[in-house]
């Protein structure tokens, strides 16, 4: 971890520079992120920082309000809590996502040319994760015709349909898996990889776990999705020691985005006002103290330290996926066992201790006669605290059962708006999109 701090400190300057200069460079027909001569080690870390600040920043905060992991309490977040958003609210997260995707594509392309296949494989997998998570909140997105530099100024990128993006996501994951199986090349990632420190075995397992996640999202559109997800699970995680977290630094300037937000904007968000924390308290959940400092209405140590990680995917989530697939397939004994394992694994990984016997007896001792989809998803909702994937789960399944926040005039949002900057610069941006509109798989 200490070895990666030098990368983070330098890269935060890159993030700030890119964010402040990208518009001028775009107008001049120059890519704001021309990385052809940037070392792969720097490029990988920069990409991971962009992704981490996107998924663990505005994306997590906005989806956290929608799925009620948190509640807005002051300033603009009190307005967000009433589901009042303008397109400009989504400018920063969009920009960071596309800077990350641009870096990752450049890293993949250049690494293949240099036969640095470990870097190429990681870039493919992280691209798939980022593209999939982004499509889940926006639906259609520019991708196949994006990243063309000056050509995109005179011929703006078109928006790929979500169904096509999901094909791209699976293809990227397959490419990543294949490239990680090759000779890694003369230069390999280590401390510059903020997720796994260059461990290609763990990256490969993450790729298979992600394949299962994204197949499951399309269950209502693809009759074969469950079979493909099950096949992918066989090659996924085998324990929580392989969980994927993107780790940040030990100083306030390189800290994780949740820590920075609570330090810089105290009182804007309340954790105690969220449905998730209410459930954690009501059930004496052993993860509560790690998630939330209830006395101060602050984050607990799991997300609240400077170097806390941003959760990408975990073994516990994979077990919840297994439980859902088994339940929908009418294999209730397997579903019950998988739920029990998932819940206990989550408690152990989050709290650092095994689940207490009393809690386990009530919440992790399901049988074929007692298991329900609602129980699976309710436990997954608590296991994925502050993870945007939980918003996707709620839209897919309807669990947990949520009601709109007080003072709202619309239903709970089901997607993000396209950002103001994209609407102004790209004539192909879909128009008339509302927060309550559904993305393609949300049937």
Image (cartoon, rainbow, N blue to C red):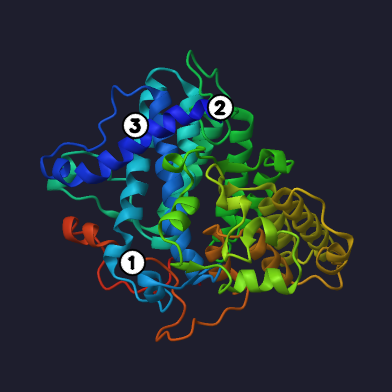
- Using residue 319 as the reference point, say whether residue 251 is left or right of it: left
Tag 2 near tag 3, CB within 8 Å: no
Residue 198, which numbered label? 2
Instruction: Report how far apart the C-alphas of labels 2 and 3 lie in the structure.
Output: 18 Å
Residue 144, which numbered label? none
Q: Residue at x 37, y 58 (%)?
A: 161
> Where residue 430 sits: x, y (%)?
27, 65
Question: Label 1 belongs to which residue?
Answer: 417
> Where residue 409 sits: x, y (%)?
40, 86
| Outermost residue to the top | 186
Q: Nearer the viewer, residue 13 or 388?
A: 13
Position of the N terminus, as image quadrant, is top right
Q: Earlier in the sequence, mark 1 or mark 2?
A: 2
Quarter holding residue 299: bottom right
Is label 3 in a helix, a strand or a loop?
Answer: helix
Neighbor class of circle 1 (other Cα within 10 Å; few <14, some 14-19, many 20+) is many
> Where residue 33 sits: x, y (%)?
26, 35
Numbered circles on residues, count: 3
- Using residue 94 as the reference point, say whether residue 318 is left or right of it: right
Q: Note whether 96 is above or below 386 in the view shown.
A: above
Tag 1 near tag 2, CB within 8 Å: no
Q: Is residue 135 visible?
A: no
> Where residue 191 sits: x, y (%)?
52, 26
Question: Label 3 belongs to which residue?
Answer: 106
Q: Is residue 75 visible?
A: yes
Neighbor class of circle 3 (other Cα within 10 Å; few <14, some 14-19, many 20+) is many
Nearer the camera: disc 2 or disc 3: 2
Tag 3 near tag 1, CB within 8 Å: no
Instruction: Report how far apart the C-alphas of labels 3 and 1 lie in the structure.
Output: 27 Å
Q: Residue at x 45, y 55 (%)?
A: 263
Q: Earlier in the sequence, mark 3 or mark 1?
A: 3
């Amino acid at each position: 971890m200490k070895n990666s701090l030098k990368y983070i400190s330098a890269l935060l300057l890159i993030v700030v520079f890119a964010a402040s200069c990208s518009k001028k460079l775009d107008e001049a027909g120059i890519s704001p992120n021309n990385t052809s001569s940037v070392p792969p080690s720097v490029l990988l870390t920069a990409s991971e920082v962009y992704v981490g600040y996107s998924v663990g920043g505005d994306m997590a905060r906005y989806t956290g309000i929608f799925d009620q992991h948190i509640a807005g309490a002051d300033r603009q977040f009190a307005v967000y809590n009433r589901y009042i958003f303008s397109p400009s609210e989504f400018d920063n997260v969009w920009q960071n996502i596309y800077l990350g995707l641009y870096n990752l594509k450049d890293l993949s392309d250049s690494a293949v040319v240099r036969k640095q296949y470990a870097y190429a494989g990681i870039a493919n997998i992280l691209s798939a994760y980022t593209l999939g998570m982004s499509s889940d909140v926006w639906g259609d997105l520019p991708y196949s015709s994006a990243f063309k530099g000056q050509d995109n100024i005179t011929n703006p990128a078109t928006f790929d349909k979500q169904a096509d993006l999901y094909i791209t996501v699976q293809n990227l994951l397959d490419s990543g898996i294949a490239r990680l199986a090759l000779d890694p090349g003369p230069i390999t990632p280590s401390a510059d990889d903020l997720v796994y420190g260059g461990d290609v075995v763990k990256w490969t397992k993450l790729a298979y776990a992600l394949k299962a996640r994204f197949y499951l999202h399309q269950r209502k559109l693809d009759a074969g999705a469950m079979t493909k997800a099950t096949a992918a699970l066989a090659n996924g995680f085998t324990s929580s020691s392989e969980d994927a977290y993107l780790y940040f630094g030990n100083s306030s300037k390189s800290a994780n985005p949740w820590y920075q937000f609570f330090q810089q904007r105290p009182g804007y968000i309340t954790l105690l006002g969220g449905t998730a924390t209410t459930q954690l308290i009501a059930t004496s959940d052993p993860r509560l103290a790690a998630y939330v400092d209830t006395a101060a209405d602050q984050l607990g140590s799991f997300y609240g330290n400077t170097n806390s990680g941003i959760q990408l995917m975990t073994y516990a989530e994979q077990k919840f996926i297994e439980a859902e697939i088994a339940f929908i397939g009418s294999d209730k004994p397997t579903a019950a066992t998988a739920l029990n394992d998932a819940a206990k694994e989550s408690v152990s990984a989050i709290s650092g201790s095994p689940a207490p016997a009393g809690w386990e007896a009530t919440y992790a001792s399901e049988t074929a006669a007692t298991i329900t989809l609602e129980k699976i998803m309710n436990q997954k909702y608590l296991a994925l605290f502050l993870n945007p994937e939980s918003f996707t789960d709620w839209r897919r399944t309807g669990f947990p059962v949520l009601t709109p926040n007080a003072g709202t005039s619309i239903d709970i949002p089901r997607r993000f708006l396209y950002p103001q900057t994209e609407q102004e610069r790209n004539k192909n941006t879909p128009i008339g999109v509302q927060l309550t509109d559904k993305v393609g798989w949300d049937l």
